[in-house]
Image (cartoon, rainbow, N blue to C red):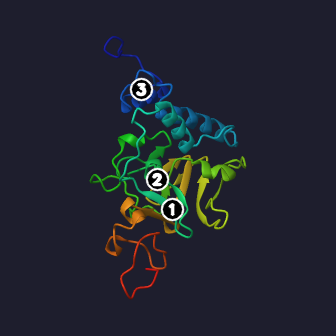
Amino acid sequence: IKETRPGAEPNSGFMEQLEMWSRIGCPMDIESNATYQRWLYKNEIELSAAIGRAPDRLRFEDEEKAIRNKALGDSGEAKEDPKRRNLRCRKCRTLLGTEEYVIAHDPKVSLEVNITTDMSSLPLPNQQAGAASLTAVACGHIFIQPLSWMRPALGTQELEGRLMCPSAKCGAHIGRWNWKGLRCSCGVWITPAFALQKGRVDVLSPDIESGKAGVAGLRMPPGVRMPPGVKMPPGRGQNL
């Protein structure tokens, strides 16, 4: 367009959509694309937050994934990644989600990240030099997409609040959320923000979950209970 009309200057919103469309591979059917749907939802959140209100509707990534998987049927495209790690409450071991819902961010690349981030285009933590890591010292929280277990907290219509473990027997404080966004300890601003505190969440590989990793493969703080099925060497207690 600029070659034909050098003075053309598309608005920033249009350019943002073009960049997103390029990032997700320029699909012909963008309306049903998960990244595009997150972008639309982000706009709703921003409009609501601008007038001091929570969004009128809640959109949870795990529920959206279940809908997409049902639509795929037996095509085989909905298979889970066997190497994907789980996020669990450190106190009661309740499953909070998998790393596919983690919003990876790299302070060396960008100062702002939002929920439109395309998870499929990002390297897994520690997979590539310079990539954001779930275990990075600089980041005190793990930012994730909104998930259905957050419904009681997000349904209050408040703009911010605390995230509690979804287990009725636990109820531990594990993080916080804010529709307007939060700044990570590494300096990156996440909008909106659903942050799990690293000191209260364990990130476990499938080998650790199944007990195949052995004690040498565990890197868990003292006092944390062993995952079910992991055997301790003779003479050792049940806790690390």
At horizontal 48% and vertical 34% (from top left) the residue drawn is 34
Spatial separation of the CA atoms under disc 1 and disc 3: 37 Å
| In the foreground, 56 or 211 | 211
Identity of the amino acid at label 2?
Answer: Thr
Disc 2/disc 3 C-alpha distance (Å):
29 Å
Q: Earlier in the sequence, mark 1 or mark 3?
A: 3
94, above or below 128, in the image: below
**Residue displayed at 45% across by 30% down:** 16
Which residue is denoted by mark 2 in the rendering?
A: 98
- Regarding mark 2 in the picture, which secondary structure is present there? strand
**43 in relation to 88, above or below:** above
Question: Which residue is the site of mark 1?
Answer: 88
Disc 3, SS: helix
Q: Quadrant of residue 133?
A: bottom left
Q: Residue 101: horizontal and vertical position, in percent?
A: 47, 48
Residue that carries the numbered disc 3 in the rendered image: 18
Q: Name above or below for residue 240 compared with residue 86.
A: below
Q: Pointer 1: residues within 10 angstroms few (<14), some, or many (20+)?
A: some
Three-letter residue code for mark 1: Arg
Q: Residue at x 49, y 36 (%)?
A: 69
Q: Residue at x 47, y 69 (%)?
A: 228
Provide the secondary structure element on which disc 1 rests.
Answer: strand
Q: Are marks 1 and 3 in contact (CB under 8 Å)?
A: no
Percent position of residue 188, x then y: 45, 52
Q: Is residue 174 left or right of residue 20?
A: right
Residue found at the very far right of the displayed protein:
156
Count of numbered labels shown in the rendering = 3
Q: Answer yes or no: is residue 114 visible.
A: yes
The extreme bottom residue here reads 235
